[in-house]
Image: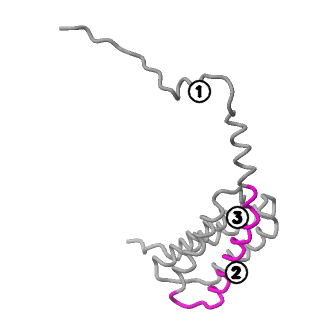
Amino acid sequence: MSEARLLKIKSPLARQVHEPGGRTVRDAEMRANRELEVHRAPVMAAIAAAVDELEAISAEASPDAGPRVYATASRIIDIGGYFDTGPLHEAVYSLCDVADRMIGAQMWHWPSVDVHLRALRLILAGDCRTSRSSAVLLDGLRSVAERINQLTAPPAD
């Protein structure tokens, strides 16, 4: 019986990683962010258009509009996912959560949606920057979400 031998094989990639030259991770990240920033204005315009769409759905207030609110709000999360949108992401996520709970409970409360939409407009007007105002808005949205959680929770046994 022969003795087992361990062979260390170095792949071409492993050799290249240890050679001098190339880009650092920091340089690659800065370059990627710079290239991505070119798309920021069109993305923010698309987000504003989606908020317009949400406002139109809310004004319609039809009983079957819940899934459309959820779909449109989740599209905002998808569109803005590559950018630092600060408090906007949390506000839209809250709207998705509230819409999902109301859809599941088959109970719709349009004022809760309207509060979220007003907060989204204010956050967009503030260029999606984190501030004391945005913190207050997010606290208010958390209160709205908690109230919806209470209203849509199944009855205790």
Magenta span includes 50? yes
The residue type indicated by label 1 comes to Val
In the figure, 23 relative to 56: above or below?
above
Of the two numbered discs 3 and 1 on the same chain, state the one appearing first in sequence.
1
Residue 52 marker: 2
The residue type indicated by label 3 comes to Leu
The location of residue 78, given as percent across then percent down, is 59, 64
Find the distance from the CA under tag 1 to the CA under tag 2: 49 Å
Of the two numbered discs 3 and 2 on the same chain, state the one appearing first in sequence.
2
Q: Is 33 left, or right, of 12 in this rendering?
A: right
Q: Nearer the viewer, residue 3 or 109?
A: 3
On the image, which quarter does residue 110 sit in?
Answer: bottom right
Check the picture and name the quadrant holding the N terminus.
top left
Q: Which stretch appears magenta? A: 37-64
Q: Nearer the viewer, residue 99 or 17?
A: 17
The residue type indicated by label 2 comes to Asp
The reply to whether callout 3 and callout 1 are in contact (CB within 8 Å) is no
Q: Residue at x 50, y 73 (%)?
A: 101
In the figure, 69 relative to 13: above or below?
below
Disc 1: which residue: 17
Category of crowding for the residue at label 1, using alpha-carbon neighbours closer than 10 angstroms: few (below 14), some (14–19), many (at least 20) = few
